[in-house]
Image (cartoon, rainbow, N blue to C red):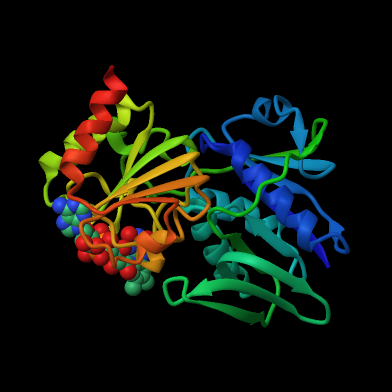
């Protein structure tokens, strides 16, 4: 089996994508034949500027602005029906893997964390809010998969890609009607933060979310939230932690008013140190954290902030 990696160079986290793809191929594709890496980018200088590579050769798929439809047109022409296409974790990887498979009448599975290619291609992914691991047999090539969030990372080998071709995307008329960029649409450095305050339903309102956001900044960190806090619009949806949001690995994660449901906990379990503040001693998070404070989060966070400000 031959495999190809697809890297989204429009995204700020290109290094993380490459490290995750490289770790995945090292773990599961040692026996497979290496193909071409496709780098989605504005111009090929992005590829030339990389001093790490995840395969010997690369093709640059070039467009001024990222447009999935145009990328799929270009990628579809390159796709070999028996090959495996490996996309990074995240929204664009999930979308492209599913839509490429649909176009080419192949198979796709998103958020994959394991793979076996013998006579058949089987992949593993977490299902039922991370309560169960599912193993799926992919029926037909091309096999298009995207990685699960928070996969192990491995630094790719030193060196530059050999660029074998540049593929210029052509406009797909009528697909993008207009573009507007929102300044606050980014979750800042949540994915890479070393210190995270993770707030849940127990913080009760937006004012407390604002206070925790400021406190996170005082600590040099970021605020993330559980699903109820995001669904109540106390903070933007892109601050959501868990299987449906960001998978984090900070040095310290302080949870406030979070019960510790499996779907949330999956997003913080790789933290080096977890502090849980919860009024309920029996909450699941209290059994998983390194340090617990069985109290109302308000005085505890206030005291922490005062200490940090001093
Ligand atoms: C398919 C699926 C995907 C999901 N994906 C996600 C996901 O990605 N992320 C996610 O977060 N959830 C996700 N969920 C929802 C998840 O299962 C939980 O419902 C959610 O995480 C609970 O959020 P919570 O801990 O904030 O709320 P609750 O479970 O209601 O917990 C609130 C906690 O706050 C404590 N508390 C109350 N007042 C205070 C106070 N004053 N001080 C301190 N503590 C206090 C309470 O004791 C309680 O333990 C998903 C669910 C499904 C089915």
Q: Residue at x 30, y 55 (%)?
A: 226
Tell me, yes or no, if residue 8 can be seen here: no
User: Quick check: 60 left or right of 283?
Assistant: right
Q: Determine the image quadrant of residue 139.
A: bottom right
Q: Residue at x 22, y 32 (%)?
A: 303
> Camera-side residue: 118 or 131?
131
For ligand 1, the image quadrant comes to bottom left
> Camera-side residue: 309 or 221?
309
Q: Percent position (x, y) of residue 138?
A: 66, 79
Q: Quadrant of the N terminus?
A: bottom right
Q: Residue at x 72, y 51 (%)?
A: 23
Tell me, yes or no, if residue 141 can be seen here: yes
Q: How many marks?
A: 0
> Camera-side residue: 294 or 202?
294
User: Quick check: 204 left or right of 110?
Assistant: left
Q: In the displayed orientation, state which residue is furthest to the top.
A: 310
Q: Residue at x 20, y 46 (%)?
A: 297
Q: Percent position (x, y) of residue 262?
A: 40, 67
Q: Quadrant of the C terminus?
A: top left
Q: Determine the image quadrant of residue 60.
A: top right
Query: Would you place residue 233 above or below residue 60 in this image?
Result: below
User: Quick check: 159 left or right of 102?
Assistant: right
Q: Percent position (x, y) of residue 191?
A: 46, 41
User: Quick check: 1 left or right of 144?
Assistant: right
């Amino acid at each position: 089996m031959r495999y190809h990696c697809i890297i989204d160079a429009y995204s700020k986290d290109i290094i993380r994508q490459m490290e995750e793809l490289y770790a995945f191929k090292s773990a599961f594709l040692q026996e497979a034949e290496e193909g071409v890496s496709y780098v989605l980018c504005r111009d090929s200088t992005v590829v030339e500027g990389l001093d790490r590579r995840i395969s010997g050769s690369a093709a640059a798929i070039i467009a001024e602005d990222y447009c999935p439809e145009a990328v799929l047109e270009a990628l579809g022409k390159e796709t070999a029906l028996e090959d495996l296409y490996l996309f990074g974790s995240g929204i664009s990887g999930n979308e492209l893997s599913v839509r490429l498979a649909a176009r080419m009448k192949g198979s796709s599975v998103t958020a994959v964390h394991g793979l076996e290619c013998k006579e058949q291609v089987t992949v593993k992914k977490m299902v039922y809010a991370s309560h169960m691991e599912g193993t799926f047999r992919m029926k037909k090539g091309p096999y298009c998969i995207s990685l699960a969030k928070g996969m192990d990372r491995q630094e790719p080998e030193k060196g530059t890609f050999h660029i074998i071709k540049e593929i210029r995307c052509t406009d797909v008329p009528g697909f993008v009607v207009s573009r507007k960029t929102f300044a606050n649409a980014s979750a800042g450095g949540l994915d890479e933060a070393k210190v995270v305050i993770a707030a849940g339903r127990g913080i009760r309102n937006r004012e407390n979310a604002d206070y925790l956001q400021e406190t996170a900044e005082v600590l040099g960190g970021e605020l993330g939230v559980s699903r109820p806090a995001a669904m109540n619009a106390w903070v933007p949806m892109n601050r959501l932690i868990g299987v449906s949001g960001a998978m984090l690995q900070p040095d310290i994660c302080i949870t406030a008013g979070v019960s510790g449901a499996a779907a949330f906990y999956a997003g913080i379990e790789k933290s080096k140190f977890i502090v849980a503040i919860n009024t309920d001693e029996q909450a699941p998070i209290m059994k998983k954290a390194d340090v617990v404070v069985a109290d109302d989060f308000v005085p505890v966070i206030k005291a922490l902030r005062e200490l940090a400000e001093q």
